[in-house]
Amino acid sequence: MSSMTTDFRTTVETMSADVYASLKRAVELGKWPNGERLKPEQVGLCLQTVIAWEQIHAPEEQRTGYMAQTCQSSKEDEQEKDESSILRFEV
């Protein structure tokens, strides 16, 4: 590992939740808290940092880009299959 990679990881590991939230908000809005617009390279670095922080500190379902294993249409298909396999008797 290069020194820069090690330094980045150490920084992310020790970064507070407040700093993470500030970086995430800056990416969402495209500007710093003082109103100055983020440059494209700053957006990339902030987003990389946010994702790295989440990998270390956040549960999987709270991470950027998380998608549940099944989509809603799959769940509906399973329900239809379950209902169609039920035997019904008329009395």
Image (cartoon, rainbow, N blue to C red):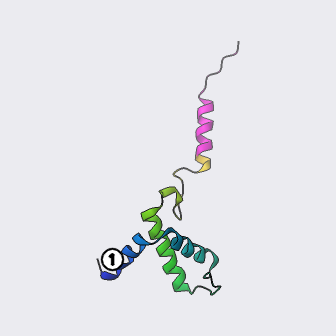
Q: Tell me the quarter of the picture where residue 79 sits.
A: top right
Describe residue 19's horizontal placement relative to residue 4 as left or right. right
The residue that mark 1 highlights is: 6
| Residue under the point 51% across and 78% down | 46
Residue projecting furthest to the top: 91
Describe residue 90's horizontal placement relative to residue 20 as left or right. right
Measuring from the top left, give residue 83's x and y in whole percent. 63, 31
Q: Quadrant of the C terminus?
A: top right
Residue type highlighted by circle 1: Thr
| Residue under the point 51% across and 71% down | 20
| Residue under the point 48% across and 70% down | 16
- Over which residues does the magenta segment extend? 75-91
Viewer-proximal residue, 57 or 40? 57
Measuring from the top left, give residue 1's x and y in whole percent. 28, 76
Measuring from the top left, give residue 82's x and y in whole percent. 59, 33
Is residue 86 in the magenta section? yes
For label 1, the SS is helix
| Residue under the point 54% across and 53% down | 68
Viewer-proximal residue, 88 or 59? 59
Whether 22 is drawn above or below 37: the answer is: above
Residue projecting furthest to the left: 1
